[in-house]
Image: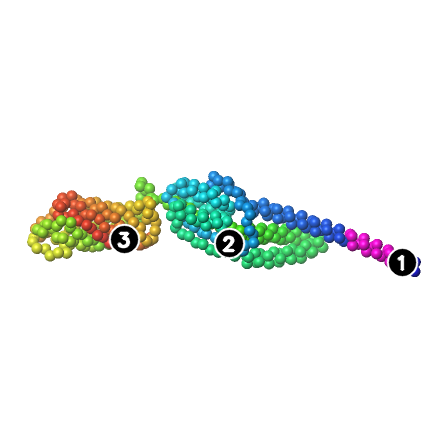
Amino acid sequence: MKYLILLLFSFVLFANESTTQATETTQLTTTESTVQTENSDKMIDKLTSTGDKVLNTTITKPVNFSIGMTLTQILDISIQTLDFEKDYDKISKLIEKYKAVVVSTNQNQYSRSKNSRISLWFTEENFNNFQKDLKEVGSVESQNLTTQNNKNQNELLQMELDYVVLKKQTYEKEFAKMEATNQNYLNFWQTIQNFNDRIFEIKKSIKLNNQQNAYYTVNLNLYEYHSEPLDSFEFINMPGVEYNHLIIDTPEKELSSEKYHGVAIKYMFSKGKSYIVLDVLKTIDKVENETQIKEIFTYGYGADFYPKHLGAGRRMFLNPYSGFTLGGSYFTSEKDSIHTFYLTAHLGLELIKTRYLIMDVKGGYFLPFSHNRNFRGYLLTGSMNFMF
């Protein structure tokens, strides 16, 4: 009986010692794993932290955001400006005012254009206010607002993470059995390192998604349009036709009719809308005597100009413009022919403008240099030009 009690007492001591060692080993393993996880998370935090200095403004990361959201809104907006530096400075001040997180910036400058792409994060309130204030910056060319759910993406990333971790563990078990002289030793070691790199990237992506859930994103494209300089010339081949309707302001019964109309050949030869026009206008009214002008033949050079602050001719539809035509004209009757020079100043609107087709209408005032009183009048025109 005495020996039996001593045997039981020894067994209890041994069991307690084994439990203590197992607990210490477990705690040590857990502590090491926690330290590795914390170091990895700190590294990810460091890589994903923001607070960049951009646009001559130091941007600090806002605080007290809720990371519990899974939905975020993304605004893609493109703004055309006619004064890049001025509007660029306005955006800098708006970024500072609404405490935006600058995710990325990219600026390019060429001989005839300037462009800046900026990606920003906002709180919901500042996001809405920033959109309102953007209306004061340039002209909005395109705007697209989408709502994104990062929860599904994170679930897919988590599935991939679990799979990669499982594969890594399988390789580590086989790698532990290998000797350094094994020909596959280095291949297995490199594969395990690749798994580690992939695990890190997946964790970083998940953390970025969780962080982005707290923000509303603005992807802003600011660019400046440069018209062709006056000393440049680029030839194009765009022949076309136009219809003209001339209404004489103060016709004289024995000299001029009240209305003339006709079809002209209009040849556009430069991107600046320089052109040559040949036109024959015939009287609409009945000719009552041989001295009355029944035809007006005109030839001239014309040019159109786009207003800088009304789109500068960049739109596909409804581009306003102004211009002039300067040339000569022959007034012919049954008895006589008169030659004089003329000037027409006009305002127009491009109905359609593509690379291969221009359709426009315009109205102007026809002003001959002689017989001015009896042949000046309003000239209404519709034209069409094709690219060849």
Instruction: Decide: few, some or many residues near mark 1? Use Cα within 10 Å; few <14, some 14-19, many ≥20.
Output: few
Which image quadrant is residue 341 in?
Answer: top left
Q: Residue furthest top?
A: 56
Residue, disc 2: 72
The span shown in magenta is: 7-21
Q: Position of residue 358 (x, y in %)?
A: 29, 53
Residue 183 appears in the picture as rendered: no
Residue, disc 3: 360
Q: Nearer the viewer, mark 2 or mark 3?
A: 2
Residue, disc 1: 5
- What's under tag 1, amino acid-wise? Ile
3D distance between C-alphas at marks 2 and 3: 45 Å
Quick check: marks 1 and 2 in contact, CB under 8 Å? no
The disc, 2 or 3, on the residue closer to the chain's N-terminal end is: 2
Residue 129 appears in the picture as rendered: yes
Position of the N terminus by quadrant: bottom right
- What's under tag 3, amino acid-wise? Asp
Horizontal side of 350 relative to 88 (left or right) equals left
Magenta stretch, main secondary structure class: helix
3D distance between C-alphas at marks 1 and 3: 113 Å
**Nearer the observer, 287 or 14:** 14
The disc, 1 or 2, on the residue closer to the chain's N-terminal end is: 1
The disc, 1 or 3, on the residue closer to the chain's N-terminal end is: 1
